[in-house]
Image (cartoon, grey):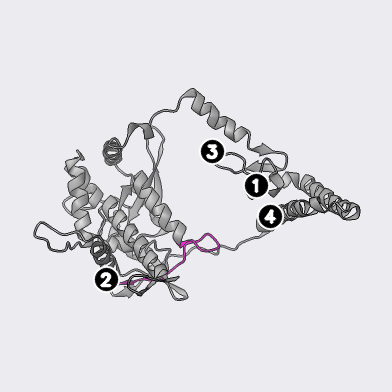
Amino acid sequence: MWAEETSSGRRRNLSYEEEEAFWAFAAIEVLRLTGVRNEELLELTHHSITQYRLPSTGEVVPLLQIAPSKTDTERLLLVSPELADVLSAIISRLRGPGGMVPLVAAYDVREKVWNPPMPLLFQRGIGSEHRAFTPTAIRKLLINALDATGLTNAEGEVLSFSPHDFRRIFVTDAIMNGLPPHIAQVICGHKSIDTTIGYKAVYPAETIEAHRAFIARRRASRPGEEYRIPTEEEWDAFLAHFEKRKVSIGTCARAFGSPCIHEHACVRCSLLRPDPAQRARLAEIRDNLIARITEAEQEGWLGEIEGLQVSLASAEDKLAQLDAEQVRQRQVIDLGMPRFNQIATRISTARGPSS
């Protein structure tokens, strides 16, 4: 999408600018909220997002797996609500028509080898293919983002940030907000910690609890109204909303607190999710609409024909949705046999026999 500035006449590629702005936002937020190194950022994949069940309460918390880099230490980070929002935005942007994150091969500048194709989180479309971000590309995103802000230091010089600066900011911010230094070292994977947290190792409960307390203190700075317990009236209204969404041919998917925009003409509504068990009822409605259109044409009721045709098209669309869903459910997908790749071999070698 191109646009022309009326003041200068300069043509601008808005699609490219939006792409650059999003990935600058994504890189800055992930670096700021995790404190990972630049090479660790570029090795994050869709499979890096995992979970851990607290032994004390059984609660499941999301974790982000960081592959070995500088210290050959694999570790796990607790995913905060803010980080989860950023990761969700990245995955939603990358998913293709089939719902999968594309597999891309990336060049490891330190190992001097090409890694096998993986669902990397930091990739983007260039022409007709997807390519992994490089360390230089991440630095360029940061430079352009800072240049757009116009921020300067005390001497009036333009600010300059590297990806590693966000790692220092993360550690400083964490310790200043009460996170114990030894916990911050575990989170950042510093070499001075004599503990290796592998992929299948038990993650220390102390690390998770301390990190969760740190996130709770950060969220405490938000308005309390956002985290208060709803009243009984509000909760009853919330439950009543979902109870009232059930209709004869399916379920209404309108958002909580929003009114019906089609005056309960559910067949016409795009928010209706038809129930496969009610296909016969939906087919009966379609046949009735066809009969009513025929009668209106014979009697000359031209004022009704147009509205009936709109309802008929909507009913046929709902039936097509049900048929397509049945086809998808019958399809069998061969996932193939799993096999070890070079990354798994390299990680096993880095862990050693004691892992």
Q: Could you say where residue 325 lies in the image, as x and y percent from the top left?
A: 67, 55
Q: Is residue 331 left or right of residue 131?
A: right
Upstream in sequence: badge 3 or badge 1: 3
Q: Could you say where residue 44 lies in the image, as x and y percent from the top left?
A: 35, 59
- Nearest the eye: 177 or 108: 177
Q: Is residue 79 left or right of residue 164?
A: right
Q: Quadrant of residue 9?
A: bottom left
SS for callout 4 = helix
- Residue 292 lies in the magenta-colored region: no
Q: Quadrant of residue 277?
A: top right
SS for callout 1 = strand
Q: Is residue 173 positioned above or below 327 on the image?
A: above
Report the residue marked by disc 4. 321
Q: Which numbered disc covers residue 273? A: 1
The stretch of residues the image draws in magenta is 94-110
Q: CA distance from mark 3 to mark 1?
A: 16 Å
Upstream in sequence: badge 2 or badge 1: 2
Name the mark nearer the viewer: 2 or 3: 3
Give the residue type that dot 2 points to: Thr
Q: Could you say where residue 303 lies in the image, as x and y percent from the top left?
A: 80, 51
Report the residue marked by disc 3. 256
Dots 3, 1 in contact, CB < 8 A: no
Q: Main secondary structure of the magenta part?
A: loop
